[in-house]
Structure formats: C-alpha cells, structure tokens
Image (spheres, rainbow, N blue to C red):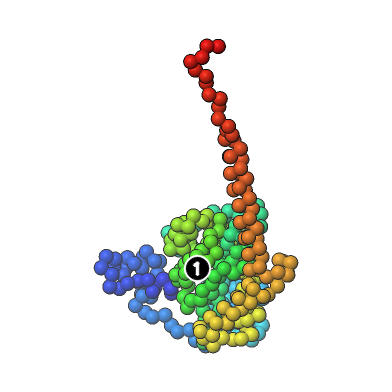
Amino acid sequence: MSPPDRRKLVDCRHDGLSVRRQCALLGVARSSVYRPPPATDDNDLALMRRLDELFTAWPFFGSRRMTVMLRAEGHVINRKRVQRLMRKMGIAALGPKPCTSRPAPGHKVFPYLLRAMTIERPNQVWCSDITFIPIGRSFLYLVAIMDWASRAVLSWRLSNTMDSSFCVEALEEALGRFGRPAIFNTDQGSQFTSTAFTGVLTAAGVRISMDGRGRWMDNVFIERLWRSLKHEDVYLKGYADGGEARAGIGSWISFYNQTRPHQVLGNRTPMAVWRDRHLRAEIDSTVVDMTLRLDNACALPTCPQPYQQQGFAT
C-alpha cells in the first residue's frame, strides 16, 4: 500500500492510539494526515496513460528510459516526476534489480517455492498481480487471480485505491468458486504480504510462495494477460468511468476464458483446459483412492483361522 493510501487508515478519533503513534506505525508523515493530497491534474493523467502504454509495450523500461521516450515525444519532464508517477501507478521495470516490490514494514515475506517445479495441473499453483487501468479523468487498479497451468482467470476486482481489501475479495471469490490451490504465488507487494491476504490463504491450508527480489520472470504469465487486456480492450475503448470499465473488462475476461484461443494451450481456451485437466485430476485421484482401498482389502484375511479342536484325544 502506498503512503497516500495508508493515510486513510489513520483514525484521528481513536481512543487507544494517538495520531502520532498511528503515523509512526504506518510509516507516514503526521503532517500529511492533516493536509489533503493534491488532486491529480490533467497533465499528470495524460502522462500516466502514456506511461502505461509504454510500460505495456516495453515492460523492461525503467524510469530512465521512460524519461527519454517521453522527452523524444515532446514532453518537458524530468526523471523524478516519472519516478513519482510510476510509483503512483504501482509499476516497476521487469528485470533484475536490487528490489522489485517492497512489503510494508512488519509484513512477513514467504520463501519462493516454485524453483525447479513442473506445473502441469489446475489448482497446483495460482498467481496474482495488480495493474493500472486509465479511465476518463482518473484511473483504477485491477487485480486478477490466475491458474498457472491453464492461464484461466479465476477472479478479478477493480479498486480506486491500492488497499488490500479488493485483493482479499478476489481471493475469497476464487477459493469459493474453484476450490483451493496447493501453492499461491505473488510478488512481495504490500497488498499480498498483508495479514488480511495471507491469513485467508493460511486458513484455507494453501502454501504461500513469493517471488524473490529481481525474479521478474516469476510473474510473466499474468504480465502477458495485462498486455492482451490493454491492447485488445482498454486502449481501444477508452472507458469513461468505473462502471464502463467494470462491464467492459468483465466482458473481455469472459471472452478470454471461454472463447479466445490460446496458442500455448494448443489453440484451446483457458477455461476449457482448466476443466479438462481438473476432471482428469479428479479421475486420477479417484483411481488412486480405489486402488489403495483394494490393496487394503486384499491385505485382510479372506477366511477364518481353523478352529482348535478341543476335548478330543489325538
């Protein structure tokens, strides 16, 4: 969660904690609680839209190259402003670097569990990420939860802040509709390291995996989803408000899951692959269970031991 979002958690009327203490725990300046953040001007919004287009096309560009690209297009802008806008958008260059996503202070970071693992069945591994969606004179954040093996989008949510609550809602919907994965993989963003998010996974018995710093390839599948969504829907339609965006993105995700052929999946749709592999996994599990039962049954004695003849001389 970014500092502007954490300010909303400060309760000036709290009886147990002073504003000073709350600000210290949240890591925000006390003066920022009393001073409302400046409204995003139209020039910033235009630059953020262009940054999003550039990032979607070349996700390995950092603030230096973004600044060069914008200046080449005639924008008068320095690198510090580009960095500020990229932080506000929640984007960072995909590539080896000292730190990709920073968890909030006090949040637990879990180890990476997917190294050398073959992922070939549904509900073996799920992953999640957040992206920036430009709308009208504002912007929204979109979170999606994807099944790694089938590339199917299991749930999604839009929000106007980077709070963790909309990520938790998407997670709870996916668990309720599609069962639970063996492993859930995310980056180290504060939304995913929050106790609200990890607590749902832990309660469901899901093992938590988090990308190591600089391991940009770990989230490449969902980054490809964002690119397809923006080029095939968001940029073409130019949504005017949140209602339009929610309806349009929902329609595109349904098209992606149910209709759009996926080359890596042999031109099958993600949800068809999820259902097929999920059904086969259930059948294999049933066969193994029946085999174990038969083996246990065969291990039992099939006839009684002969009775001892007592009271007769031999």
Front-lying residue, 101 or 249:
249
Front-lying residue, 169 or 279:
279
Q: Position of residue 226 (x, y in %)?
A: 61, 73
In this figure, what is the number of numbered marks? 1
User: Dot 1: what SS?
Assistant: helix
Q: Residue at x 39, y 66 (%)?
A: 26
Q: Position of residue 267 (x, y in %)?
A: 73, 70
Q: Position of residue 246 (x, y in %)?
A: 53, 80
Front-lying residue, 185 or 76:
185
Residue 83, quarter of picture? bottom right
Q: Which residue is mark 1?
A: 173
Q: Residue at x 38, y 80 (%)?
A: 36
Amino acid type of the residue tagged 1 in the rendering: Glu
Question: Quarter holding the C terminus?
Answer: top right
* Residue found farthest to the front: 312
Q: Is residue 33 left or right of residue 181?
A: left
Q: Is residue 203 left or right of residue 51?
A: left
